[in-house]
Amino acid sequence: MSKRKAIISCAVTGAIHTPSMSPHLPVTPEEIINHSLAAAEAGATILHLHARDPETGRPTQDPDAFRAFLPQIKQATGAVINLTTGGSPHMPVEERMRPAAELKPEVASLNMGSMNFGLYPMLDRFKEFKFDWEREHLENSRDLVFKNTFKDIEHILRTGNDNGTRFEFECYDTSHLYSLAHFADRGLVKGPFLVQTVFGLLGGIGAHPEDVMHMKRTADRLFGDDYVWSVLGAGRNQMNIASMAAAQGGNVRVGLEDSLWISPGTLAESNADQVSKVRGILEGLSIEIATPDEARSILGLKGGANVAF
């Protein structure tokens, strides 16, 4: 029997739901390159990337902003590169899809439904922000819906499918798994597909062990052997959720987009810190880490030579 190998994904660059409460969050192209390469060296199999305007810190889906760091990362590491189609909830789907549509990555992320996205509790924990727009954004999340309708999802799927791009299906609640099953039944999604179950964000499912088990049981029932299970625990839930999933045969995602912390009260100084910590958890369970090429085989990816950057 072959040994199971786990895929470590690293969400390197903070999205709009990761304001700059940490001085270690990469924003400029140079910072994103350095963090990405260090995370890959630490064992990250997949690098999930956003782009930000280096002057204002705002998320941007301008493909040129991604071109400022993607070629350098690709040339220096064999890690799989995964681009966001999330961007910002204030962007229309056509804008959010531009980097994946033009740059044709091996993998792109895809939120599997519209949802309330409550970030405002952060205001109780953090009082200082690097950029002026961040406080207002967090406050406005009391009345924020991240829109991803069936029409939006179908548009993203068809565009990615035409480019040979596969998806990291981000599922924040049980209904998102059923939406994914709907598109699989229609033939727009074909296995093996990467299901990233997300825990602990206000508006989605919680981070209790029973929530983790419920999502896995539901995915097992809906998809059988056609999917690859991974988990993302937000904030302080990051390593607890990763540990639970690893013990059950799951893959893991860490990174400063998902959590700014390395331990209670201590900020992670880099993405590589979190990758090294979760790698230690996996190896402590006698689980080997998948190489990028092994992940390409597991997920049926087209290969790094077939992207447009």
Image: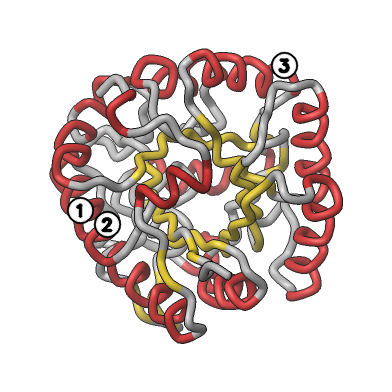
Q: x%, y% of residue 282?
A: 47, 77
Q: Which residue is mark 3?
A: 151
Q: x%, y% of residue 244?
A: 63, 76
Colour treatment of the image: secondary structure
The quadrant of the image that shows the N terminus is bottom right
Which dot, 3 or 2, sits closer to the camera?
2
User: As displayed, is residue 257 above or below residue 280?
Assistant: above
Left or right of 10: which side holds 86?
right
Which dot, 3 or 1, sits closer to the camera?
1
Q: Which residue is mark 2?
A: 40
Circle 1 residues within 10 Å: few <14, some 14–19, many ≥20: many
Q: Amino acid at mark 1?
A: Leu
Q: Amino acid at mark 3?
A: Lys
Q: Nearer the viewer, residue 38 or 291?
A: 291
Q: CA distance from mark 3 to mark 1?
A: 36 Å
Q: CA distance from mark 3 to mark 2?
A: 35 Å
Q: Which mark is residue 37?
A: 1
Q: Are marks 1 and 2 in contact (CB under 8 Å)?
A: yes
Left or right of 109: which side holds 71?
left
Q: x%, y% of residue 39?
A: 27, 59
Number of labels in the image equals 3
Q: Nearer the viewer, residue 218 or 11?
A: 218
